[in-house]
């Protein structure tokens, strides 16, 4: 292989990702339509639910100053309006925008009507309509229960009997940390801390059952953003080699398909386009060497277990006395080889 000369700038490692917050503001969404960014599914039998953003009566958050002031206002809420009485029938509305690992979600809900059932809840760490956890409140039986669904088979319920009057707004909070799950209703613990490792990450969804008409509002998720495998690989490598000045991984991604940064010590650089050098490394396996002010950098192919080039690693080093191209290559090669040992195929970078 031949090496080519070019200059690069210094890349600095960034700190860990901070907690993120996601709010579902239905007041900003069109009325009488399903909310954008969500997907309707059904677990069990029957048709998907009828999910819409509607206006509903809502008590004011602050007590009225005057006794003559109205004590009810209207707000935009998420409503499940279908009334399919099928027994094993759970309409769900899935948030497609994020996959959650550790999180705390709070939502307010109201069970409005239902002859067969009168329930509302949240599904979480959802893989598909047959594999997920869910916690639901039941206004007919006055209880809150945790369930696990694996390949469509429901687990034994866990929870407590508590009043869940219909027509009243309640607050449900669920927290997942690693394999620990816990829940509260109106500030009181209803699901004691339990441990389960079936699902460690997944989607979040609003949940109802059978002919339940239920409303949801004020939904907030605080979560630890999921770190893509390529970014986890860069972080681990920088931790193992603290004297590195920088590290990036490039791969073909996006629409249209282009060479871009998929992981970097400075996470603000993720998504930036690569150049001709990165494309050439992907196409030919050529190695590039560059010197900057106080830096020495090597651009090398990252290969899968079959030797196929799947990405490009850019290693930025601090120059040593008498720095040469071969010296930089000798220093960078074992670092890239260790990275390759953790990457069996392209999936290991993206999923």
Image: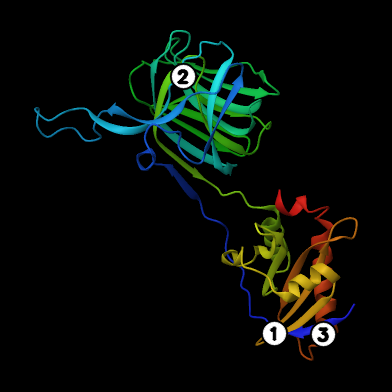
Q: Give the residue pinned by disc 1.
A: 7
State the SS at label 1.
loop
Residue 144 percent coordinates (x, y): 48, 19
Which residue is painted at 49% across and 39% down in the image? 104
Residue 104 is left or right of residue 71, and the answer is right
Mark nearest the camera among 3 and 2 is 2
Which residue is painted at 9% across and 27% down in the image? 67
Q: Is residue 194 above or below residue 144?
A: below
Q: Give the residue pinned by disc 2.
A: 82
- Mark earlier in primary sequence (3, 1): 1
| Distance from Cα at disc 2 to Cα at disc 1 | 62 Å
State the SS at label 2.
loop
State the SS at label 3.
helix
Residue 130 is left or right of residue 268, and the answer is right
Within 10 Å of the Cα at label 1, are there few (<14), some (14-19), or many (20+) other Cα atoms? few
- Mark earlier in primary sequence (3, 2): 2
Mark nearest the camera among 3 and 1 is 1
Residue 258 percent coordinates (x, y): 69, 63
How many marks can you see?
3
Which residue is painted at 76% across and 51% down in the image? 348
Q: Is residue 46 above or below residue 228?
A: above
């Amino acid at each position: 292989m031949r090496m080519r000369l070019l200059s690069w700038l210094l890349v600095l490692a960034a700190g860990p990702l901070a907690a993120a917050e996601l709010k579902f503001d239905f007041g900003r969404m069109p009325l009488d339509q399903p909310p954008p960014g969500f997907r309707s599914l059904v677990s069990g039998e029957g048709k998907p639910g009828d999910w819409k953003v509607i206006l509903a009566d809502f008590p004011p958050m602050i007590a009225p100053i005057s006794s003559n002031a109205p004590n009810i206002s209207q707000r935009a809420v998420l409503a499940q309006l279908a009334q399919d009485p099928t027994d094993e029938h759970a309409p769900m509305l899935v948030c497609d925008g994020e996959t959650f690992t550790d999180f705390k979600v709070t939502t307010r809900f109201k069970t409005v009507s239902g002859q067969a059932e009168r329930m509302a809840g949240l599904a979480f760490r959802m893989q598909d309509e047959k594999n997920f956890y869910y916690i639901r409140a039941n206004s007919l039986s006055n209880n809150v229960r945790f369930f696990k669904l694996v390949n469509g088979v429901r687990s034994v319920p866990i929870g407590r009997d508590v009043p869940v009057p219909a027509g009243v707004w309640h607050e449900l909070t669920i927290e997942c940390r690693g394999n620990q799950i816990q829940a509260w209703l109106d500030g009181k613990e209803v699901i004691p801390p339990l441990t389960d490792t079936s699902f460690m990450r997944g989607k979040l969804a609003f949940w109802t059952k059978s002919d339940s008409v239920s409303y949801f509002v004020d939904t907030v998720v605080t979560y630890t953003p999921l770190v893509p495998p390529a970014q986890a690989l860069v972080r681990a490598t920088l931790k193992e080699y603290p004297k590195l000045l920088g590290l990036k991984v490039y791969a073909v991604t996006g629409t249209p398909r282009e060479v871009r940064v998929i992981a970097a010590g400075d996470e603000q650089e993720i998504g930036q386009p690569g150049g001709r050098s990165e494309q050439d490394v992907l196409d030919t396996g050529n190695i590039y060497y560059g010197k900057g002010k106080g830096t020495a950098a090597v651009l090398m192919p990252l290969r899968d277990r079959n030797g196929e080039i799947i990405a490009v690693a850019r290693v930025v080093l601090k120059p040593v006395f008498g720095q040469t191209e071969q010296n930089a290559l000798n220093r960078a090669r074992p670092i890239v080889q260790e990275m390759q040992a953790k990457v069996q195929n392209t999936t290991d970078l993206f999923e």
